[in-house]
Amino acid sequence: MQVSRIECELREVVLRDKPPCMLSASPKGTVPVLIHGEANVLEESLDIMLWALRQNDPQHWLPAEGPLDQALALVARNDDEFKYHLDRYKYENRHEAAEPQVDHRAAASTFLLDLEARLCQTPWLLGSALSLADAAVAPFVRQFANTDRAWFDSQPWPKLIAWLDDFLRSALLASVMDKHKQWAPGDATTIFPCSEEASWQRSL
């Protein structure tokens, strides 16, 4: 929404105290949820990103048809293969896994080494321009890195580290990290995005 500049009503949810109206709209009970129109509910981050960018894409995050397929394939690897191991690396105590934490870290690193290989060729994951793939993958790489930043920084992926650090320093990330109080019925409406257009630039 921040990049597409499509305004929406923001309702901050605490997952241990989900409001009934959210569960009525989206019984799966996960966030984010976007409700638009009378009964249109989007429950996945990628679906929300695609919907918003197809309405308005001022920074040209949606590549052409062929590269878009590549972007979606990379995001699918991130959401399935990488996130599976990330969750078991980051939240070891929440999962009864046969493999130890370091094995999940090693398995997740295979994906990160692939990203490094891409970034050795081009400044962004799919070429010379920032795309949906960078924006969708970066938050998960951030989670992985923050689990043990010293270890992450010692690995043979300097291009990935620079790419991530540019994301962490970006006006784009700063613009969406504001804290909001938990929404309750009757609260004043909070409109998002509430700041000026922001971007993510590479320091090459």
Image (cartoon, rainbow, N blue to C red):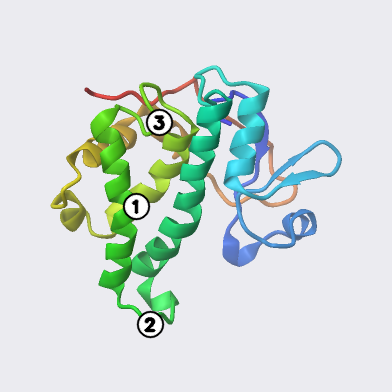
Q: How many marks can you see?
A: 3
Specify few, some or many for label 3: CA neighbours under 10 Å numbering under 14, 14-19, or 20 or more: many
Name the amino acid, label 1.
Phe
Whole-percent x, y for residue 14 in the image: 58, 58
Residue most toward the front?
Answer: 66
Mark 3 and mark 1 lie on one chain; the one further toward the N terminus is 1
Residue that carries the numbered disc 2 in the rendered image:
98
> What residue do we see at 24% from left, 24% from top?
203
Image point (84%, 44%), residue name: 39
Q: Residue 17, located in which quarter of the rendered image?
A: bottom right
The residue lying toward the viewer, choosing from 10 and 1, is 1
Counting from the top left corner in percent of width and height, residue 149 is at 21, 54
What's the residue type where badge 2 is placed? Ala
Amino acid on which the number 3 mark rests in the picture? Leu
Of callouts 3 and 2, the N-terminal one: 2
Which of the numbered marks, if any, corresponds to residue 111?
A: 1
Helix, strand or loop for disc 3: loop
Describe residue 122's horizontal placement relative to residue 197 as left or right: left
Q: Is residue 45 above or below residue 159?
A: below
| Residue pointed to by mark 3 | 126
Which quadrant of the figure has residue 135? top left
Residue 2 seen in the figure: no
Q: Residue furthest right?
A: 38
- Image spot of residue 189 (x, y percent): 69, 36
Tell me the tag on residue 21: none
Q: Residue at x 62, y 34 (%)?
A: 50
**Which quarter of the rendering shows the N terminus?**
top right
Q: Nearer the viewer, residue 39 or 24?
A: 39
Instruction: Report if the CB atoms under discs 3 and 2 are less than 8 Å apart.
Output: no
Could you tell me which residue is drawn at 34 percent across and 67 percent down? 89
Query: Residue 5 in the image: x percent, y percent?
Result: 59, 23
Q: Give the secondary structure at mark 1.
A: helix
